[in-house]
Amino acid sequence: MSNVAILGAGAFGTALAVALSARGPVTLWGRNIAWGRENPRLPGVSLPDTITITDDLAHVAAPVILLALPAQSLRTFLVHKAALLDGRDLVSCAKGIDLDRLTGPSRLIAEACPAARVAVLTGPSFAADIARNLPTALTLACEDAKVGETLQERLSTPTLRLYRTTDVIGAELGGALKNVIAIAAGVVAGAGLGDSARAAIVTRGFAEMTRMAARLGARPETLSGLSGLGDLVLTCSSTQSRNFRFGHALGAGEAFDAAITVEGAATARAIAAMADDATAEMPIAAMVAALAEGRVSVDNAITQLLNRPLKQEV
């Protein structure tokens, strides 16, 4: 029997399965898995024989389950499948905020599976790097410190190093909010505004992230770690990031493949609504939401941000 299962056979879920198979048998569940032993989303990466692939969730018996599903799909999945998951260690790998509930994945999981022990795995990582066993460090967040220690040991590999925290809110918000700022950084690059402008948008974006997270109960130091600053640096500086590429297309006035999941676009809309309730200023996030919905042009968004009142840096 597998010790660990991953639900979601996209690039990231498949990469996690490959990495964790170094520790023992792994089960990988997905809806569309006709591709056999090589996921087309991870070309050149063959799945080891220690990975069992299935599309039947009833056959997933592992005590530890990683939910590598898109943030906006998770709630619907749990409505139908929670009974099969409850009572186990459930680790959310989603980076986003549910648009309808305006809450993070860990709360959705805890409400749907009250007997489960819930944790969050997040941080700076590209699927291709993890699948090729390149050194990667992530944050594992769990409110129960003992459960967190056990999961940290079980999910760490020679090339996948996990750092532990009990600040689930901070880790989750860092992973979600950095996607919004990555879109903004992509817009700046696509519009040809220069590296200085990109540095400014990333820095001020990080200030927004930290401010909003603190208002929602996160510890500021968590946002300065892997799940916040670390993930922000990665996604704002590489075209491997779907959010950065989406922003780049917006900035350049180019079409973007609608079939590609861009978590930051939905998160921007959610965080704009949450900012009103938390009375937190989130001008960059608000502009990203407006751009993604086509409510403002790139030129107008830039003008509005540059014309904001001058203020002390905080």
Image (cartoon, grey):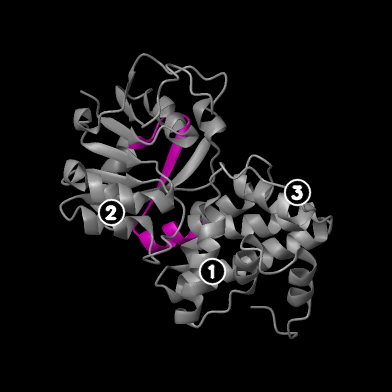
Q: Is residue 59 left or right of residue 106?
A: left
Vertical order, 19 against 217 (above or below): above
Q: Say which residue label 1 marks.
A: 210
Residue 48 drawn at (x, y percent): 40, 16
Secondary structure under tag 3 reads loop
Residue drawn at the location 29% of the way across and 22% of the way down: 25
Q: Quadrant of residue 58?
A: top left
Magenta region, residue range: 155-174
Tag nearer the camera, 1 or 3:
3
| Position of the N terminus by quadrant | top left
The circle on residue 254 is 3
Secondary structure under tag 1 reads helix
Specify which label sits upstream in the sequence, 2 or 1: 2
Residue drawn at the location 81% of the way across and 60% of the way down: 196
Q: Are there few (<14), some (14-19), or many (20+) residues within 10 Å of tag 2?
A: many
Residue drawn at the location 40% of the way across and 67% of the way down: 102
Q: Say which residue label 2 marks.
A: 109
Residue 161 drawn at (x, y percent): 45, 38
Residue 166 drawn at (x, y percent): 34, 58
**Does the stretch in magenta take in 158?**
yes
Q: Is residue 103 left or right of residue 44?
A: left
